[in-house]
Image (cartoon, grey):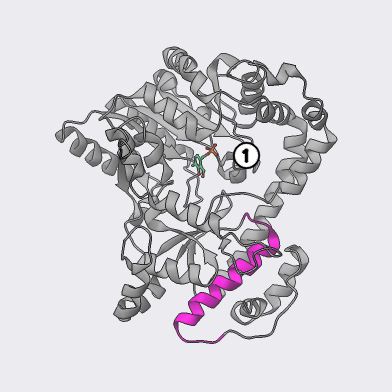
């Protein structure tokens, strides 16, 4: 007998998904200096290794390691779906300290789950009915599509803002003047959805944004809240990159939300700033009691493991450590990498939107697309090997980069309208970062037929000293010399 097919819903999940397929492909041949030196260096995924050593030593220094080593049956048996009540309490303390909400949060405003992906799924399950629309200004985090649609059947509606990259986040509008352009676009998208018979349930933002690494100004957040109030829709803000934004970041919870207080919901988790994606802990802050109760009922589907929960509880409650040690180091490392890129990218004629948050930049590789347009044969042969069957120039360029051993996340994974943009992650381990950049620059150079210099240099570990050395060389020559593979 042949296998019975999955449900109609299940069949949707069998279809190719660009981001998921690419990340699996990169993971299958991941670069490792010793065991797989010809593998692919992942400069695309949003993972943060900058604070790895720091967090590891914190775990060893504190009692957390002991808690886990001496893990008793107390932790292994069925526990609270929140791990323990201490976890939402620690999360409330953390948000009250670092996000400065106008209305102080208590543990009953916090729902915890095994990561933001799970929380987004549960949140939207309880916020909107299948068929409803959720508006997302784009480019933005492509997996929102998956989180909203895979099980909930919601429509993620991209609201294209590629041409207002700055004004989308911060636009000064004089009193009495028209509203910011972003609101015009939200309005248009809402009208179109309603004309299709779809109710609009929410606006969803990532602040700081992924992949643009920019923070919304408090003025712009106020406009958006006002618009959501007028349209009677929820506002969901994913603030998972909050701490990386430093002074630039302003939580929506800090605004006077007035009668919208119960309709604005904020997400945060351990995966990004703390680099603890394997910890699988995320949380939602909401003042909406009914929503809280609905999600609490569903929390058995997103049960938090005792192991991840113990680490998150201790770390989130260690306010002194976060503010006095973790944050200054994190900000210094981010600055070091951003300064480095500010030399290397322009030196090599790569445009990018300068980041003020997160650990990636959105680079513009459009000039290299033309190479594929002019080389029809090459494009066809490259596109033929693409798992999604797509034949765009952007994916052809990506194939070329992968062929040279480096991966960047393509703009179309973020609903970008203009082809040729990629997310470049600078949060990976220092040696890999420099080597990955060398491969990227080498791959772009190879398109115009330039040969790499065969000389090999010891890259060393990325630090301020090395950065100075690198700045003394012209980016091209120096970096292409680093990599002869
Ligand atoms: C904006 C945003 N939200 C959520 C996530 C997923 O977070 P988690 O690891 O907690 O599921 C990511 C991961 O890239 C992200 O960029």
Q: Is residue 440 magenta?
A: yes
Q: Is residue 176 shown above or below 264?
A: below
Q: Is residue 67 left or right of residue 186?
A: right
Give the prevailing secondary structure in the magenta stretch: helix
Residue 231 or residue 43, whichever sits in front: 43
Q: Tell me what residue is drawn at x 59 percent, y 79 percent.
A: 476
Q: Which residues are magenta?
A: 427-451
Per the image, label 1 sits on a secondary structure element best described as: loop
Q: Is residue 105 shown above or below 319?
A: above
Q: Tell me what residue is drawn at x 61 percent, y 27 percent.
A: 95
Q: What percent of the width, then of the height, locates residue 351? A: 47, 68
Residue 332 or residue 110, whichever sits in front: 110
Q: Is residue 297 left or right of residue 29?
A: left
Q: Tell me what residue is drawn at x 42 percent, y 38 percent.
A: 205
Q: Is residue 131 shown above or below 347?
A: above
Q: Give the residue pinned by disc 1.
A: 278
């Amino acid at each position: 007998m042949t296998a019975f097919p999955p449900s109609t819903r299940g069949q949707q999940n069998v279809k190719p998904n660009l981001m998921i397929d690419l990340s699996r492909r990169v993971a299958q041949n991941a670069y490792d200096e010793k065991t797989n030196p010809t593998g692919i260096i992942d400069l695309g995924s949003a993972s943060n290794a900058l604070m790895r050593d720091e967090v590891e030593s914190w775990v060893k220094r504190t009692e957390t390691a002991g808690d886990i080593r001496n893990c008793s049956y107390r932790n292994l048996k069925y526990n609270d779906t929140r791990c323990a009540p201490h976890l939402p309490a620690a999360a409330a303390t953390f948000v009250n300290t670092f996000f400065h909400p106008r209305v102080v949060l208590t543990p009953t405003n916090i729902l915890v789950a095994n990561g933001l992906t799970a929380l987004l799924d549960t949140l939207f399950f309880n916020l909107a009915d299948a068929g409803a629309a959720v508006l997302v200004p784009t480019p933005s985090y492509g997996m929102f599509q998956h989180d909203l649609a895979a099980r909930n059947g919601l429509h993620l509606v991209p609201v294209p803002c590629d041409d207002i990259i700055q004004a989308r986040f911060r636009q000064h509008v004089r009193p009495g003047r028209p509203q910011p352009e972003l609101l015009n676009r939200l309005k248009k998208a809402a009208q179109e959805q309603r004309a299709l018979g779809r109710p609009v349930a929410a606006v969803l933002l990532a602040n700081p944004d992924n992949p643009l690494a920019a923070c919304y100004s408090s003025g712009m957040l106020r406009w958006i809240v006002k618009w959501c109030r007028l349209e009677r829709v929820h506002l969901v803000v994913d603030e998972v990159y909050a701490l990386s934004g430093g002074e630039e970041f302003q939580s929506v919870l800090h605004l006077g939300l007035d009668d919208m207080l119960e309709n604005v919901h904020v997400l945060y988790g351990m995966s990004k700033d703390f680099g603890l994606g394997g910890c699988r802990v995320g949380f939602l802050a909401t003042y909406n009691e009914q929503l809280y109760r609905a999600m609490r009922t569903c929390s058995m589907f997103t049960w938090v493991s005792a192991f991840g929960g113990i680490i998150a509880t201790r770390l989130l409650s260690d306010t002194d450590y976060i503010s006095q040690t973790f944050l200054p180091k994190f900000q210094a490392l981010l600055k070091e990498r951003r300064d480095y890129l500010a030399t290397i990218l322009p030196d090599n004629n790569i445009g990018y939107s300068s980041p003020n948050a997160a650990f990636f930049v959105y680079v513009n590789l459009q000039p290299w697309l033309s190479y594929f347009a002019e080389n029809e044969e090459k494009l066809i042969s490259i596109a033929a090997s693409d798992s999604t069957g797509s034949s765009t120039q952007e994916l052809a360029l990506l194939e070329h980069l992968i062929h040279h051993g480096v991966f960047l996340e393509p703009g179309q994974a973020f609903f970008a309208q203009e082809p040729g943009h990629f997310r470049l992650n600078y949060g990976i381990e220092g040696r890999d970062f420099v080597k990955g950049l060398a491969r990227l620059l080498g791959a772009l150079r190879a398109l115009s037929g330039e040969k790499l210099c065969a000389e090999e240099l010891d890259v060393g570990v990325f630090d301020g000293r090395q950065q100075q050395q690198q700045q003394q060389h012209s980016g091209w020559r120096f970096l292409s010399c680093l990599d002869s593979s």
